[in-house]
Amino acid sequence: MNTTLNMDRAGRLVLPKPVREQLQLEPGEPLELESFDDHIVLRPVRGNATAYKKQGIWVFRTGPLKASVVDETIRKVRKERERQILGTKR
């Protein structure tokens, strides 16, 4: 996505909603900023996930998830299951 942002007098920027949704950014979430000669890069600060084997299955330890991420994942899984069930009955 390419867009033009305007900085306010205090130097703040507002990230467009589609970008925040795509990156699953929540208010107050930290961002890392890198500045170069002619551009800047913003990245979400996310912990490093570690993997370990539990009862023969690889599990990723990422730390606590935000409630909004869990709710959205549950909603998507339920919707997909509903599509599969209704799709086989037709």
Image (cartoon, helix red, strand yellow):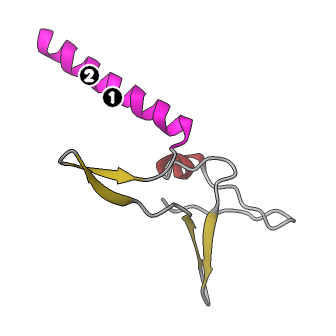
Which contiguous range is marked in magenta? 65-90
Q: Residue 80 at x, y = what percent?
A: 28, 26
**Image position, residue 87 (x, y; %):** 17, 17
User: Which labelled disc corresponds to residue 81?
Assistant: 2
Residue drawn where x is 40% and y is 53% of the image = 61
In front: 10, or 50? 50
Identify the residue at the far bottom of this view.
37
22 to the left or right of 7: left
* Most frequent secondary structure within the magenta stretch: helix
User: Is 51 placed left or right of 32 in the picture?
Assistant: left
Question: Could you say which quadrant of the image residue 32 lies in?
Answer: bottom right
* CA gap, disc 2 and disc 1: 6 Å
In the picture, the disc for residue 77 is: 1
In the depicted structure, whether residue 3 falls above or below residue 70: below
Look at 50% across and 61% down and name the residue there: 47
Residue 78 horizontal/vertical position (percent): 34, 23
Q: Nearer the viewer, residue 58 or 24?
A: 58
Q: Residue at x 67, y 48 (%)?
A: 27
Task: Give the answer, above or below, for where 39 lies relative to 85.
Answer: below
Q: Residue at x 26, y 22 (%)?
A: 81
Q: Amino acid at mark 1?
A: Val
Q: What kind of element bears circle 2?
A: helix
Verify CB contact (< 8 Å) between mark 2 and mark 1: yes
Q: Residues within 10 Å of mark 1 (few under 14, many from 20)?
A: few
Reply yes or no: does residue 41 show up in magenta: no
Task: Determine which quarter of the picture holds residue 9.
Answer: bottom right
**Residue type, mark 2 in image:** Arg
